[in-house]
């Protein structure tokens, strides 16, 4: 089983075993925008044994089962319209609330600590670029792509769109996902893996925690679209 799973593209593997996302986050493995790599390659890049990772995932799944959590829904088996609703109500709602709050928090920390920590100026710049990417991105998904996906599912795949194939807006969304993932990597580097400096105040620590939570949620968000919603929508249309 380990040999078989090690050759599955990591994005598809996480789609099949949703609990793996938390384990991969802790291991620092990108399963969203680099989801086309085999699991074995991703483990090798991080110096992790595949068997060790699979054991950690199995333990995570057992804990989830014990908690009887509904957080880990298998979206491969749910209607596409339900997945679109979930993304809007969960991930988009989070971003719409968190991005303005985090921008204010970064400004507060910058005003207090920029002299001793000039890297905060770069953190503010990269976050502002990320926010400027995400806000219109969500608008396009909610007004164009997701309604198209819902139409496709309702009609059984036989729909003529003014933009042609649903693959066209999907390609735009994937490109923007890649840009967002790049910004997240830069933020992680600039913050030293979100480790607070020795003189960090509570606001500084809260900013770093919020940035880390943003990365965690965006990874799940992008994964659900890149590896589940988009392939299923294109398969339905074809």
Image (cartoon, helix red, strand yellow):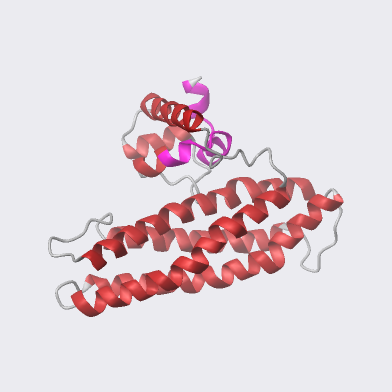
Question: Does the magenta stretch mainly form a helix, a strand or a loop?
Answer: helix
Q: Using the rendered image of the protein, determine whether residue 52 is visible from the camera's viewpoint.
A: yes
Q: Residue at x 68, y 38 (%)?
A: 77
Side of 202 relative to 221 (left or right): left
Q: Nearer the viewer, residue 52 or 142?
A: 142
Q: Residue at x 36, y 34 (%)?
A: 44
Q: Nearer the viewer, residue 236 or 142?
A: 142
Above or below, 76 against 5 in this view is below
Q: Using the rendered image of the protein, determine whether residue 238 is visible from the camera's viewpoint.
A: no
Above or below, 115 against 172 in this view is below
Q: Residue at x 49, y 40 (%)?
A: 37
Rendering coords of residue 230 (x, y %): 65, 51
Extreme-front residue of the structure: 67
Q: Look at the image and give the residue range highlighted in magenta.
A: 2-22
Is residue 216 on the magenta stretch?
no
Q: Residue at x 48, y 33 (%)?
A: 67
Rendering coords of residue 116 (x, y %): 14, 74
Rendering coords of residue 205 (x, y %): 25, 61
Above or below, 31 against 188 in this view is above
Residue 129 placement: quadrant:
bottom left
Side of 233 relative to 204 (left or right): right
Rendering coords of residue 65 (x, y %): 51, 29
Q: Nearer the viewer, residue 170 or 210?
A: 210
Is residue 10 on the magenta stretch?
yes
Extreme-top residue of the structure: 1
Side of 144 relative to 172 (left or right): right
* Number of marks in the rendered image: 0
Side of 199 relative to 94 (left or right): left
């Amino acid at each position: 089983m380990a040999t078989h799973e090690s050759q599955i593209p990591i994005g598809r593997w996480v789609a099949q075993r949703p609990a793996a996302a938390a384990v991969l986050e802790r291991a620092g493995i990108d399963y969203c925008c680099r989801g086309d790599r085999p699991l074995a390659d991703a483990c090798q890049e991080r110096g992790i044994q595949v068997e060790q990772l699979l054991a950690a995932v199995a333990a995570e799944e057992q804990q989830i089962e014990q908690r009887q959590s509904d957080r880990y829904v298998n979206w491969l088996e749910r209607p596409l319209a339900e997945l679109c609703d979930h993304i809007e109500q969960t991930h988009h709602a989070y971003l719409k609330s968190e991005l303005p709050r985090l921008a204010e928090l970064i400004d507060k920390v910058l005003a207090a600590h920029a002299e001793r920590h000039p890297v905060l100026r770069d953190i503010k710049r990269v976050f502002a670029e990320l926010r400027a990417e995400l806000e219109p991105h969500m608008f396009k998904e909610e007004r164009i792509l997701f309604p198209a996906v819902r139409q496709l599912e309702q009609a059984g795949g036989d729909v003529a769109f003014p933009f042609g194939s649903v693959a066209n807006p999907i390609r735009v969304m994937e490109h923007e996902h890649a840009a967002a993932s790049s910004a997240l990597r830069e933020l992680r580097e600039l913050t030293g893996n979100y480790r607070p400096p020795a003189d960090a105040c509570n606001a500084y620590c809260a900013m770093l925690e919020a940035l880390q939570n943003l990365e965690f949620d965006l990874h799940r968000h992008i994964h659900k679209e890149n590896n589940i919603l988009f392939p299923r929508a294109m398969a339905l249309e074809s």
